[in-house]
């Protein structure tokens, strides 16, 4: 229990303490921790210059022992009344700060690890073929994205332009995407890097991953459909990837850990996680113009973040502090658990009806998409992730 007045039901209670980077008028970027409706200025509270760098990378690079010690100190400061006089002056109302991109991202990788999502897309796009590619149940499928277009929540989503070719067209055309989509995902932030040539085993996941955020990997489905053969996503994905401003520490999600669904066939040895289950009971919510349209359950993901990390390094690829990798679109078995519009509208064939009487197949200019999520916390509390929001603007 904190001496600070923390609102009931907040996702930012003492069991969470997510990290972000913030500023106030006339000040430089610095590290903050969310607690209730406030942000604790760590640069001022600790005097440690690592919190005045304007990014979390330098803190994350210190490693798990330093992460644990800082979390222990923060918990003590915010629960022991004797620290109140020293700490309270450094608490700022969250509504008065500007939140920024929390990490500098050297590399970004996106996976495709929800079986329900993969099967839905297979049935939509390849109705005469098996819904899953032959390799899908053997390895976490992914692609290397564009780190330079990872941006914080609130960044405008400018409708991308590119080549499109509908099945009935003889030749491709160029212009704004007509099938702009959202993708509700969970992201994982690497804190400690690895040496080139040295794979990271599933068991070492908590030695390298600092925390978790929310991701919306916006997708131009028409650009993607024309360009992705034979090398995969490119311009249809690289125009923007939005992330939430708060990174929830892995330690805060210990109460949310679960086993992943049973896999068939059994994964190859380097992907086996029987003794190291790193599934998470996280429920996402997707809102379009304020209307709840989906609640995807991350618990149903076929491949876990630990397996994704093992696979992305098994060839010897190195990790760097700040690397971000995402789960891929999260979808559940029910129609209202689909994490993208291409699924919710079944490829545009079944327009999604909104409570205001409008319908959508894909995103229109002016649409606002907001992703939120929650997970079980200690003593019956809930862990919140903040939100990642984007407003669609016309092509330029």
Image (cartoon, rainbow, N blue to C red):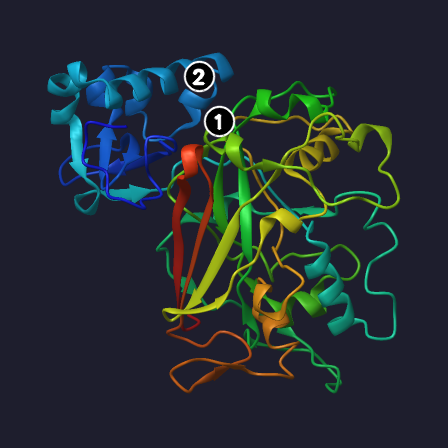
- 10 Å crowding of disc 1: few (<14), some (14-19), many (20+): some
- 10 Å crowding of disc 2: few (<14), some (14-19), many (20+): few
Instruction: Give the residue number, with chain letter if any, for mark 1.
Output: 251
Compared across the picture, whether 137 is left or right of 328 comes to right
Compared across the picture, whether 249 is left or right of 49 comes to right
Quadrant hosting residue 271 = top right
Quadrant hosting residue 87 = top left
Relative height, residue 106 to residue 125 (above, below): above
Q: Assign the C terminus to one quadrant of the image.
A: bottom left
Q: What's the distance in space between the residues labelled 2 and 1, CA to CA? A: 8 Å
- Residue drawn at x 24%, y 43% as measured from the top left: 7
- Residue drawn at x 74%, y 34% as measured from the top left: 311
Nearer to the camera, 300 or 346: 300
- Residue drawn at x 17%, y 39% as measured from the top left: 24
- Residue drawn at x 74%, y 23% as measured from the top left: 199
Nearer to the camera, 374 or 182: 374
Numbered mark located on residue 227 in the image? none
Say whether disc 2 or disc 1 marks the residue closer to the N-terminus.
Answer: 2
Residue 383 in view of the camera: yes
Image coords of residue 116 (percent x, y)? 70, 59
Q: Are marks 2 and 1 in contact (CB under 8 Å)?
A: yes
The secondary structure type at the circle numbered 2 is helix
Instruction: Give the residue number, with chain letter if any, for mark 2.
Output: 68
Residue 103 in view of the camera: no
Nearer to the camera, 300 or 244: 300
Image coords of residue 196 (percent x, y)? 69, 21
The secondary structure type at the circle numbered 1 is helix
Image coords of residue 67 (percent x, y)? 44, 18
Relative height, residue 147 to residue 287 (above, below): above
Q: Tally the marks.
A: 2
Q: Assign the N terminus to one quadrant of the image.
A: top left
């Amino acid at each position: 229990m904190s001496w600070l007045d923390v609102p009931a039901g907040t996702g930012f209670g003492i069991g969470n303490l997510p990290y972000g980077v913030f500023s106030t008028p006339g000040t430089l970027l610095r590290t903050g921790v969310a607690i209730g409706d406030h942000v604790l200025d760590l640069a001022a509270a600790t005097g440690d210059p690592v919190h005045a760098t304007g990014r979390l990378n330098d803190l994350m690079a210190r490693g798990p022992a330093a992460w644990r010690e800082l979390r222990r100190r923060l918990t003590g400061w915010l629960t022991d009344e004797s620290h109140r006089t020293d700490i309270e002056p450094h608490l700022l109302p969250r509504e008065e700060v500007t939140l920024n991109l929390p990490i500098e991202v050297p590399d970004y990788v996106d996976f495709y690890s929800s079986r329900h999502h993969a099967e839905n897309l297979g049935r939509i796009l390849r109705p005469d073929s098996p819904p899953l590619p032959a390799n899908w149940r053997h390895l976490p499928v992914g692609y290397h994205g564009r780190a330079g277009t990872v941006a914080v929540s609130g960044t405008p989503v400018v409708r991308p332009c590119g080549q499109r070719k509908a099945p009935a067209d003889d030749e491709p055309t160029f212009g704004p995407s007509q099938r702009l989509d959202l993708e509700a995902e969970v992201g994982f932030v690497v804190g400690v890097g690895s040496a080139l040539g040295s794979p990271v085993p599933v068991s070492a996941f908590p030695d390298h991953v600092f925390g978790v955020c929310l991701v919306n990997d916006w997708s131009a489905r028409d650009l993607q459909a024309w360009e992705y053969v034979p090398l995969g996503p490119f311009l249809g994905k690289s125009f923007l990837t939005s992330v939430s401003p708060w990174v929830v520490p892995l330690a805060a999600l210990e109460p949310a850990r679960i086993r992943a669904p049973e896999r068939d066939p059994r994964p190859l040895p380097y992907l086996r996680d029987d003794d190291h289950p790193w599934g998470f009971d996280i429920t996402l919510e997707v809102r379009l113009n304020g209307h709840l349209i989906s609640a995807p359950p991350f618990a149903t993901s076929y491949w876990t973040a630990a397996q994704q990390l093992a696979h992305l390094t098994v060839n010897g690829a190195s990790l760097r502090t700040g690397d971000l990798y995402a789960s891929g679109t999260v979808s559940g078995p029910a129609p209202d658990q689909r994490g993208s519009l291409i699924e919710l509208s079944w490829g545009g064939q079944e327009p999604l009806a909104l409570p205001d009487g409008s319908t959508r197949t894909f995103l229109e200019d002016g649409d606002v998409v907001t992703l939120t999520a929650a997970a079980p916390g200690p003593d019956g509390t809930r862990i919140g992730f903040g939100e990642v929001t984007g407003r669609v603007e016309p092509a330029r």
